[in-house]
Amino acid sequence: MVKIFIGNLASETTAKELRELFEKYGKISECDIVKNFGFVHMDNLSEAEEAIKNLHQTDLNGWRMNVEMSKGRTKFSTKLHVGNLSEEVTSEILRAKFEEFGPVVECDIVRNYAFVHMEKLADAMEAIDKMDNTAFKGELFGREKLLVFSLTIFFLLVACS
């Protein structure tokens, strides 16, 4: 899997728009926007390189996108989808909460939900077990609100340059 960073996105840009743009070059396994930047995960390295070559510095919604390989480190992680977050929860607050259970590789809030990548499967499972049906910053974490992505553990290998 290849992780692509997309910077300089217009505030009205949607994940759907970004996905449709990148799907012209290959299969997309994930597409997320966080504030004015986003990440697209493609299954094939050559397709990702082609997308980067063709989309870097192109216009989307009046803004010239910066498209490049993500510079994050290669790492296996367990990805959790955390839903129903209140507006006052920041990435730093959420990361600190999950770090009570173990190392967090990445933590990105997207509107009222987030993706938290934990280094160890056991730590992710403990976080789910301990936070299931508990309140955090005024919102309820329930099994339906704190999910393991796709109702199973999703192992993520992030490729980088």
Image: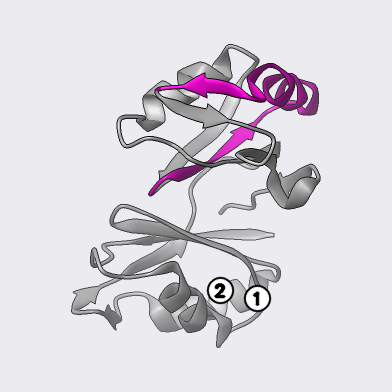
State left or right for residue 146 relative to residue 125. Answer: left
- Identity of the residue drawn at 52% across and 29% down: 140
Quadrant in which the N terminus appears = bottom right
Whether residue 75 appears in this view of the structure is: no
Around disc 1, counting alpha carbons within 10 Å, would you say few (fewer than 14), some (14 to 19), or many (20 or more)? few
Look at the image and say whether residue 100 sits in the magenta stretch.
Answer: no
Direction bottom: furthest residue: 24
Whether residue 117 appears in this view of the structure is: yes
State left or right for residue 64 relative to residue 135. Answer: left
Kindly report the distance in space between the C-alpha atoms of the residues bearing marks 1 and 2. Answer: 5 Å
Q: How is the image coloured?
A: one colour
In the foreground, 142 or 99: 142
State left or right for residue 91 relative to residue 36. Answer: right
Look at the image and say whether residue 122 sits in the magenta stretch.
Answer: yes
Q: Position of residue 77 (x, y in %)?
A: 70, 37
Disc 1 residue type (three-letter): Ser
Q: Which residue is mark 2?
A: 49
Q: Position of residue 64 (x, y in %)?
A: 23, 74
Q: Are marks 1 and 2 in contact (CB under 8 Å)?
A: yes
Q: Which residue is mark 1?
A: 46
Dot 2: what SS?
helix
Disc 2 residue type (three-letter): Glu
- Kindly indicate the quadrant of the structure image that contains residue 15: bottom left
In the foreground, 75 or 111: 111
Q: Which residues are magenta?
A: 111-137
- Identity of the residue drawn at 47% across and 17% down: 96
- Identity of the residue drawn at 37% across and 35% down: 86
- Kindly indicate the quadrant of the structure image that contains residue 12: bottom left
Q: Which mark is residue 91?
A: none
In the foreground, 47 or 118: 118
Q: Image height check: is 133 above or below 156?
A: above
